Amino acid sequence: MSEFSIKANNISKAYRKGAIGSGTLSRDIEQRLSFIFKEKLEKEVIKIEQNQLNWSLKDVNFEIQEGETVGIIGKNGAGKSTLLKILSKVTTPTKGIMEGYGRVASLLEVGTGFHPELSGRENIFLNGSILGMKKKEIQQNFDEIVDFSGVESYLDTPVKRYSSGMYVRLAFAVAAHLQSEILIIDEVLAVGDAEFQKKCLNKMGAISKNQGRTVVFVSHNMQSIQTLCSKTIFLEQGELAGFGKTSDMIQNYLNRNLVFKHVSERIDRKGDGRVKVVDLVFIDAKSNKITNNFYAGMNLIIDLKLSSYQFNLKSNLEISLGINDQFGTRLTLISNKVSGQTISPLEDGVWTQKIAIYNLPFAMGNYSITLFIASGGVIHDWITEAMPISIESDRFFGELAQTLPNGQGSFYLNFTYL
Amino acid sequence: MEKKHWIINSDNYWFKFKFTEAWEYRDLFILLIKRDFVAFYKQTVLGPLWFFIQPIITMVVFVFVFGKVGAFSTDGLPKPLFYLPGIICWNYFSECIIKNASVFRDNSNLFSKVYFPRIIFPFSIVFSSMIRFFIQLLLFILILFYYYFKGFEIQLNYTLLLFPYLLILLAALGQGLGLIISSLTTKYRDLSLLVNFGIQLLMFATTVVYPLSAAPERYKTIIALNPITSILEAFRYAFLGHGDFSIIILLRATLITAIVFFSGLILFHKVEKNFIDTV
């Protein structure tokens, strides 16, 4: 018997930042050519740029014992998916060694490898063998898979005629019955109805408890991590921020997200300071409580506390909040100048300005808010990236909605199919 | 059950193939071939009939354009009998290249989610296309019989025994070229634009619409060096008794094919590990 199931030794993964590999042959040749004719100093600069690496995982170490169910939590971009990709052998680490015992099956997205034209039956076999099962093993588990998925009467229908719920159920059923010692699951429970989600959770619990299999589970849903996992890996900016009891890790994670330099303590601000932001909190309009849990589709109230002194209003006061994505690209601007509203603080002192945002349209990801206050061409307060916002889930179209697929943009339009 | 110990690290050797692992996935290989075949005829109205329609129409066009209008030589053979083997072999060859060339792009969604020996996919492509090749070959044999009953003398000979070998050569050459292109396209996407165009041009440097004996003297050596020409001529020689065939030529074609095939395999192996980071 082996003492561990998965062991990570100094796992690091880097992605190249620079201009190498522009994607087309002609541009690459052009770059090489122009490189030859550049000055020596310039060349050095380019070399450094090209060698700049973006470490999405840095020296991650952990050891998972056999039969454990381990969760992985962290913000978007913390390296969760990279870690899973390395674990499931889809990509290799830049440095470090991952080792373990037994077959690894990964369920990274439900229904990958399903062919729409093929029947449910054919897809069970195809999907199963893509995930690493032998035909014989699938045959042995076939009845159980069908039973669990509940699509019995549609077995010989092409899966393109399945409802999305049936599709997911079948896909999960195949993966859940994999005969592997290690099962890796990413965010499957984001889809499907509540009843099925519960069924999946129970199944996953059973897998680790009764069958002694090791399960690694990534989710944004703290609730399901809490119920399923005994231990949890907490990643932050590619580094292991903690590995231990799930409840402790979740507490850490939630605390960490609350801790940031308060706006009143920010010194890297510009402006004459005659009007200043002293506090900024977010209120979930539904519960009317202060929150730091953001989801697409929520009604959000931004509660700004401002102070003004020696301030006489000569022209309209402008309070603007710019929203940037994680790459620093300006996505939109919330401003009373844009909406044509006027703000008139009556006297010096502390006052409040609330801003309501309806149906927050941003998809899962990290954003930041830049604060800007000015009047009559004079800047009073300007803090870039004053406040981070991490959108943790997408509920723009209600509870059953799915998230935007990767690479399909970062915000929703409020549309409906008539 | 003994639990297998595994290690994932950054080692990326040029020549470390995992044959035993690929063998473990043989069921997937067979299912993929089945999938391609079933999906093809489920998506079309006429179904498997397409396997026949395409070569017949191409043949008719060739007979008209190259045979009648252009008056190209057909080595004294009836025109349909001359064109059909060329069309069938070329179809198979070009399909192997085109499908292999886009194997990373077509499956990037799957490859980025699940691990399995990637090489299974290119091999399944070659074999599922082979089913189509055999069906079309049947058509050729039917037409051959038709001409036989009309009085055409079939000169079957011992080279027919080489048929499986010729087929393997053709498949390996197509796969090798396809793999080289697919490995390079992960970095240079514009190469994929060149593929369809290049294959079209390559057909005219191969003896598909004319026999080698009718090629202009000046270009004959270049055309003859083309390994597909050698394979194609050998096919014609085996079935029809006309064509440029000798053991030396066959050995030369084998050598070129082996070089192309193994370069493709090595490049593919080098790229497969981390291509997902660049796509």
Image (spheres, coloured by chain):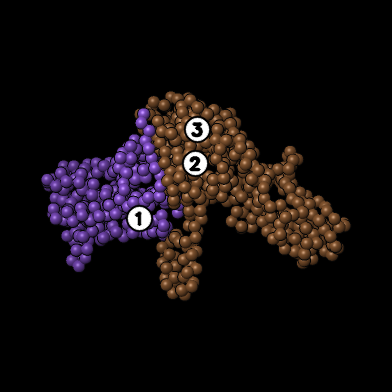
Mark 3 and mark 1: span between their CA atoms? 44 Å
Chain A drawn in what color? brown
Q: Which numbered disc flags the more N-terminal residue, 2 or 3?
A: 2
Tag 3's secondary structure? loop
Chain B drawn in what color? purple
Residue drawn at (29%, 54%), measured in percent from left and top?
A: B263
Q: Is residue B215 left or right of residue A269?
A: left
Amino acid found under the numbered disc labelled 1: Ile
Q: Is any part of residue A116 visible from this angle?
A: no
Amino acid found under the numbered disc labelled 2: Phe
From what the image shows, is residue A323 above or below residue B50?
below
The label shown at residue A68 is: 3
Residue drawn at (46%, 28%), measured in percent from left and top?
A: A212
Residue A376, x across and y down, in percent = 79, 66
The answer as to whether the residues below labels 1 and 2 share one chain is no
Mark 2 and mark 3: span between their CA atoms? 13 Å
Q: Which residue is mark 1?
A: B181
Residue B76, x across and y down, in percent = 16, 55
Residue nearest the observer in this picture, A80 or A110: A80
Instruction: Using the rendered view, name the quadrant where residue A36 is placed.
Output: bottom left
Q: Which residue is mark 2?
A: A62
Q: Mark 2, residues whose alpha carbon is within 10 Å: few (<14), some, or many (≥20)?
A: some
Amino acid found under the numbered disc labelled 3: Glu
